[in-house]
Each structure stands twice: as structure tokens, then as C-alpha cells.
Amino acid sequence: MQGKTLFLYNTAHRSKERFEPLHDPVSLYCCGPTVYNYAHIGNLRTYIFEDVLKRTLVALGYNVRHIINITDVGHLTSDEDTGEDKMEKGAKREGGSVWDIAVHFTQTFMHDIALLNILPPDKWPKATDHIPQMIDLVEKLEGHGFTYKTSDGIYFDTAKFPSYAAFAGLDTENLRAGERVEMGEKRSVTDFALWKFSPKEEKRQMEWESPWGIGFPGWHIECSAMSLAYLPQPIDIHCGGADHIRVHHTNEIAQAEAATGKTFVRYWLHGEFLVFEKGKMAKSGDHFITMATLRQKDIAPLAYRMFCYTAHYRTPLSFSWDALAASAQSLTNLRRVIGSLSSQSKASSPSVLQIASALDPFYTAVADDLNMPRAVAALWDIVRNESLDAHLRRVCAEQADNVLGLELGRMPAETVQTVVGADGATMRLECTTCIPLDICDKLTAILSERRRARREKDYTAADRIRQKLGAAGIIVKDQPDGSTTISIPAGICTDDDKKALIFMD
Ligand SMILES: [Zn+2]
């Protein structure tokens, strides 16, 4: 894919632009989680899109330096600098210390993204480890005359930054007139806290000394301080969810550019929401779906990743359990087709030129602002194209998977094979590790016999067969849903520790 031009939609200019980085490695900053609760799958959609971006850059031959921060303090419940600190609120809910909550939810977040096959960043800076850098940035802003003090904190004076409204296309006049926002002592609705003072009547668990008094940083200053601490300015790419455009990223730009006098970021990319029928995904109630929810419903994490590829990252993606199940099936089908290519493959290795030519439609889709629905369709066209050698098709799938991250080379977990037993009954065999399921006729006949006995309610006969199989190391377990799980030891299947699910009509 090297040599292919990458086009990305830049929110800053509302247009698709040719990507030309300033730095090697390409600097990539992604706003990280506020670690006060589990991440819901809508949040995780953003990290999947960012992972595709990073994998694409690598596939194009770029080196990448990738930072995802951990917000473990200072994110208030509203964007207008009112409400409680989400972390302190989370600690009250969970009954632990704020520090414990932060560690716990940081770990669960990292576990979630590992399940989704999201590559870890080069660094995970935590806000609480960068308080001096934040204070330094606020002091710079103070020195340049961009701040003012109220009774509850140090604020950024947006009137002093004339291009404030440009990034999000804000209509600041109407914002003032139209929104009933708690202004407090703020001079303007768009002004935002850089440093908040600890409330006098309340002892916060997280607070620090500063030149302005004991308190804690504003959420926006955290990202500016941490991104500038680890990446050279201007940063090549900064990503986040579309909900960050209006306030969080607008404020990050204002404070970083006011402090340094330089362009903060060159390419801004934003992922759209995962939506339910009634609009944006909520973080509460039935719509609070996490990786744990998927596990409870036996949905593989990578099925969710596959589902995310059914829409472009800049398009809202409508969630439904049926659509998710369809993506799970589609991933299984894709793996099965690719798995079957391995057994058909010839020994000869395809040339670099052959691979590049076959994969061209796939890479063209990816390089066109990460058009994953088109990329997945292009991969299907390649693996099903019988005019191409099977080995070539398989190599193409492996390379495409460096971008897709779907573990396509893994033998399908849900491989299905239909076998007609000795009694004429059809069995559907699902093997957790191999394709095709290598199960001998004799065993098939015995299992059919047992199934017939159970159907005729001859449980003594069924049990006798189960014990006979058990003596041979084959474990037979009847499931409440009517299916039977068979664990087959090495020697019967080709690999060790095979498990097969067997259904019969
Ligand atoms: Zn951020």
C-alpha cells in the first residue's frame, strides 16, 4: 500500500484533504477515557475508528507516535464548567477512593480495547501525573493576558481569542442569547475554566497546590498539556468523538494556540455516534452496553468491530442486536472462506506486484478517508474471485487484516459442517478450532445412535453410549437448549483439545 495517497476529512476545514504529515513519526493524539465508569460500546466505536487510522498509516509506510490520555480528574458533568467532577462522583457511587476508581476503570478500559484488537498507544499519560505541565500552561496564558479570576477558578477569556468560534462554526451571538446557561461570574458563555478552586466547604480527594490556590485542572487544559508534552507542535492528527468538536476541542485549540502562538493541530478527525432508534447513545439504562454485556450475550468482541465497519466513521451507526448478529455471522463467513483458501493453496508464493494489484481496490477504499464499508466489500470481492489463485487470495486477506484487525487468519470459532449420520439424521457440527471438522464416520454413527435414543426417551441407552464415549475420552454434555457439546481429545481430531457442538435435526 506504500505510495498510495491518503485522504482524510479535516473537521477544521470541513473538507477531505490529502494527508501530508510534518513529522516522522506522524504524531497522533486521541482523547482518552474519563475513567469513572465502564466504557460503553458507543465510546469504543471511536477508538476502533482511531485504530483503523493508525493501522492505515502504518500500512502506508508511516511511522506513528500515538498518545491516548487517561482523564482521571477534572472532567465535570457538564460542558459549561458546572456540576460535579465525574471522578469524584464515580467514587461516591462505587464507594471507593477516587484513586482506586481511576485504577480500576483504567484497567477495564485497557482490557476492553485489547479485546477489540485495538493496538495500544506508545504512551498512556494520566492527567494526575501532569499537573505541573497544566499549571505551566495556565501561567503562560496568564502571562499573555488570556485569563481572569472568579471566586471559583481561573477562566480563559474567549473574547481575547478572536478565532474562537471558527473551528466549530459557532454562532456566539446566538449562543449568548439562546442558551440558558449558568453563567456564574463568567464574562462570556464560551469562557471556560482552566483551574478550579476546591470548594471551601468540601474536602476533595484529588486536589493540588497552585499559584492561584488549592484546586484541580479543567478538563480541556489536560489534553492540551499532555498532547504538547509528548508530541511536537503542530501535532499532525488529533482525534476524538464528534461530541468534542463544539466545546472540548474548540477550547483545546484556543488555550494551546494562545499559550504558544503556534498552530496546535493540522488535521482534526472526529468519529460519529453509535445511535439507537431514539437518538444518541445514552450512558444509562438499557442503552448502557459494555463489552461485558456483549460477553453475556455470547457476542465475540471482534463481531462488534466488524459491525463498526458497516458504516463510515463519519456517519452515525444505528445499533440493533439483529444488525450485530448479522455482522457476527458475516465475520464467521469471511473467516470460513479465507480458511478454505488455505487448504486449496498451492505452494508458490505470489509476487509483490500480484498482491498489490489484487489489493488495490481495498487500499483505495481505505485511503479514501477510511471508507471501511467499501474496503470490506472489496475484500469479499478478492477472496471470492476464482480467477485469482487461492494462495494469492489468502495472502491478500492476511495483508488486509493488518488494517482491519479482525484476526481473519484465525480459524473460525464457529465453523459449521453438516454431516448425515448413520440413521439418516442430519447433524450440524461446530468446531471451536478447526475446519473442516475432522470427525470419523464411526463416531458420527455412535452420536446419531445416542441422539435417536434420546429422541425416543430411551435414556438408559443414551446414557450407556455417553459412558462408552467417556471411556474413550470423549465428553458428551447435553445443553438446556437441546444441543449437545462434544469434547473430542487429540487423535480423533487432527489438533489437540477439540470441542465440537453437535446439533441434529
Ligand atoms: Zn481531549
Image: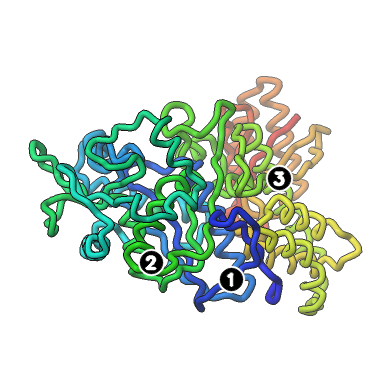
Q: Nearer the viewer, residue 161 or 128?
A: 161
- Disc 2 to disc 3, how far (Cα)? 34 Å
Amino acid, disc 2: Lys
Vertical order, 452 against 66 (above or below): above
- Disc 1 to disc 3, how far (Cα)? 26 Å
- As helix, strand or loop, the secondary structure at mark 1 comes to helix
Mark 1: is the Cβ under 8 angstroms from ligand 1? no
Nearest to N terminus: mark 2 or mark 1: 1
Residue 472 appears in the rendering: no
Vertical order, 344 against 440 (above or below): below
- State which quarter of the image contains the C terminus: top right
- As helix, strand or loop, the secondary structure at mark 2 comes to loop
The colouring scheme, among rainbow, by chain, secondary structure or one colour, is rainbow
The disc label shown at residue 123, or none? 2
Residue 432, image x, y percentages: 62, 49
Q: In this view, does 208 lie to the left or right of 77?
A: left
Disc 3: which residue? 330
Amino acid, disc 3: Ser
Tell me what residue is drawn at x 82 percent, y 75 percent.
Answer: 354
View extreme (left): residue:
201
Tell me what residue is drawn at x 15 percent, y 42 percent.
Answer: 151
In front: mark 2 or mark 3? 2
Which quadrant of the render holds ligand 1? bottom left
Residue 35, image x, y percentages: 33, 47
Disc 1: which residue? 58
Q: In this view, does 294 lie to the left or right of 397?
A: left
Nearest to N terminus: mark 2 or mark 3: 2
Vertical order, 300 against 230 (above or below): above
- Disc 2 to disc 1, how far (Cα)? 17 Å
Mark 3: is the Cβ under 8 angstroms from ligand 1? no
View extreme (right): residue:
387
Q: Which of 400 and 154 is in front in this view?
A: 154
